[in-house]
Image: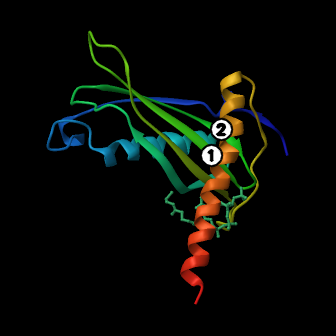
């Protein structure tokens, strides 16, 4: 199976916060933001895997700053690391308003699984990190995966033991 570079999975999309996307306080509704992030991250995983992908987990969602109505959002996503059928995508959202400094709005990690024609998990190409940031994210992704699966297995064990 061919190997690919992180840069090949890079996705950047834009959106703007409309009144219908906001909560009662006039700032972007978190669920709306997560939906945009899931879509951008999914496209990144899809680009890397070149196969159907589905979201299996979302974690470490950090809402750093509010985005009021009228904020232009920039969503950036790339595959941090591939495991076997799954891959971790990192997503960062920044916000821009005229005459203001661009701010970090939200970050998260989303894990996607590639599926074959029978909707069963299927292997995805290896990924090669090149820059220092890509290498750091690649290393950290394995630590996060271990923590994710360990928590899942610990809770499964606890909840199924007599
Ligand atoms: C994703 C899905 C196919 C995985 O099925 P499964 O029976 O758990 O498959 P497996 O146990 O073989 O796991 C497949 C991969 O997912 C990973 N995985 C499973 N649960 C995970 C979790 N909670 N967090 C991170 N990774 C997870 C496994 O480690 C494995 O990765 P690997 O192949 O890289 O080692 C299945 O859970 C599913 O269909 N979920 C619903 C997806 C969905 O509807 N998403 C929302 C719409 S996109």
First in residue order: circle 2 vs circle 1: 2
Give percent across and percent down for residue 18: 22, 34
Residue beneath the point at 60% across and 85% down? 161
- Is 59 left, or right, of 132 in this rendering? left
Q: Which residue is mark 2?
A: 80
Give percent across and percent down for residue 59: 50, 50
Q: Secondary structure at mark 2?
A: strand
Residue beneath the point at 26% across and 38% down? 28
Q: Quadrant of residue 34?
A: top left
Q: Quadrant of residue 37?
A: top left
- Is 119 left, or right, of 97 in this rendering? right
148 to 65, vertically: above or below: below
Camera-side residue of 45 and 65 = 65
Q: Residue furthest right?
A: 1
Q: Which residue is mark 1?
A: 88
Residue beneath the point at 60% across and 30% down? 10
Residue 99 is at least partly visible in this image: yes
Q: Quadrant of residue 141?
A: top right
Q: Are the two marked residues, 2 and 1, in contact with CB atoms closer than 8 angstroms?
A: yes
């Amino acid at each position: 199976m061919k190997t690919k570079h992180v840069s090949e999975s890079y996705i950047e999309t834009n959106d703007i916060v409309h009144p219908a996307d906001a909560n009662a306080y006039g700032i972007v509704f978190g669920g709306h933001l997560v939906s945009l992030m899931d879509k951008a991250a999914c496209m990144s995983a899809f680009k890397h895997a070149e196969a159907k992908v589905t979201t299996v987990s979302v974690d470490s969602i950090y809402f750093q700053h509010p985005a009021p109505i009228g904020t232009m959002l920039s969503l950036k996503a790339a595959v941090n690391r591939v495991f076997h059928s799954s891959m971790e995508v990192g997503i960062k959202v920044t916000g821009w308003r005229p005459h203001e400094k661009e701010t970090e709005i939200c970050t998260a990690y989303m894990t996607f699984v590639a599926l074959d024609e029978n909707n069963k998990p299927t292997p995805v190409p290896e990924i090669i990190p090149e820059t220092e940031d890509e290498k750091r994210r690649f290393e950290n992704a394995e630590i996060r995966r271990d923590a994710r699966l360990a928590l899942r297995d610990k809770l499964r064990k606890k909840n199924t033991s007599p």
